[in-house]
Amino acid sequence: MRTPKGASTESGATMVSSDLTVKTAWLYYVEGLTQEQIAEKLKVSRVKVMRTLAACTADGVVVTTINAQTARQVELERALEEQWGLDAAIVVPTPSGEEHLEKAIGHSVALYLDAQMQDGMTLAIGGGATLHSSIAFLSRKHLRDASVVALVGSLPHSQWINPSTVAAKVAEAFDVDSYQITAPVIAHSQALHDLLWTQPELMDVRKRAAQADIALLTVGEMSPNATIFRHNIVPQSFIAPLKAKGAVANMLCYFIDAEGKIVDHEVNGRVMAIDLEAVSAVPNLVLAAGGKRKIPAIRAALKAVKANVLITDSDSAAALIQPR
């Protein structure tokens, strides 16, 4: 796969953060990394690291300890990175009301995409409330030779819950082409599912997704409140039998167990989405999810795919670094 214009050729995703200045100070003063090591992690010059550290001292961010409100978030980010083998974690403060959580994480997702998406890059993206909430915060810009690929099929009634809507609107924000899985999210039968994937147009979408530079997805829990059940993408009557098979989460409408494995239920054979194994092979995979009720689902998702970046909230981060 070609390296996008302007992208780093080093392996691994660029380390990101809720506050890169504080993270630089944390890496240097708390973890004892050298300036060269920090520059490599952040994909910046050593001179920039030196200037950032000098500014931290001058501005009072660093005294004898790191003195900033975001220090706790950075501490959680580093703990997540260590425990889950992430290239980077972004932790946002948990809002006072749960109804604001998706927007808080969505805002961080938008900032991440604004910073990471460059000319020549392909973004493969799922659906769901968290990712949809990021659209309102995206900066409008024009990218050349870039594209957005939907990872999940479509719904006949095009509300915000339609997974393909997220891909189309993100592509619109970046003024690039989008590629859709023009088939229902759940096919009526395994035979129809298999037949649909033989269509050249859908085979092309699958190929483009496999060659993406960034994959962005979220995860849902196994409850009637989850988007997939609340909006009847999958009937709520499936919850009990899926749980009986060990399902604790859904990713791209596939149902997985606590170890991140696809459960043995017929609905998984009818999902019109790029398979998790292919998505996991994308070089920069970003998982965005939060909320205490989603902790088992997030843990399962981190086992199901090799995430490079996790975007979550502080309460969820604290729970995710605790032993099960």
Image (tube, grey):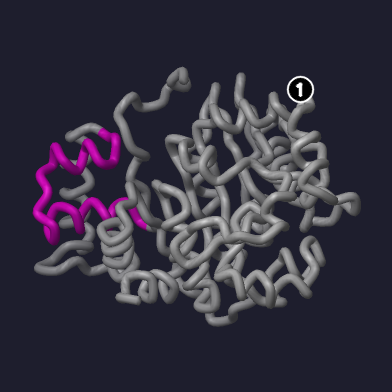
Across and down, in percent, residue 315 comes to: 43, 76
Q: Nearer the viewer, residue 199 or 45?
A: 199
24 in magenta: yes
Q: Which residue is at 67% across, 54% downward?
A: 268
28 in magenta: yes
To which quarter of the image does residue 171 belong?
Answer: top right
How many marks can you see? Answer: 1
Q: Which residue is at 53% across, 72% downward?
A: 294
Q: Which residue is at 29% across, 52% downward?
A: 21
Quick one: quadrant of the C terminus?
bottom left
Stretch in magenta: 19-44
Q: Main secondary structure of the magenta part?
A: helix
Q: Which residue is at 42% across, 57% downward?
A: 303
Q: Is residue 176 left or right of residue 182?
A: left
Task: Name the kind of residue labelled 1 in the image.
Answer: Pro
Q: Is residue 237 left or right of residue 319?
A: right
The residue that disc 1 covers is: 200
To which quarter of the image does residue 177 belong?
Answer: top right
Q: Is residue 239 left or right of residue 32?
A: right
Dot 1 falls on a residue whose secondary structure is helix
Q: Nearer the viewer, residue 255 or 174?
A: 255
Tag 1: Cα neighbours inside 10 Å, few (<14), some, or many (≥20)? few
Q: Nearer the viewer, residue 150 or 263?
A: 263
Across and down, in percent, residue 193 comes to: 77, 42
Across and down, in percent, residue 12 comes to: 33, 37
Q: Is residue 190 above or below residue 57?
A: above
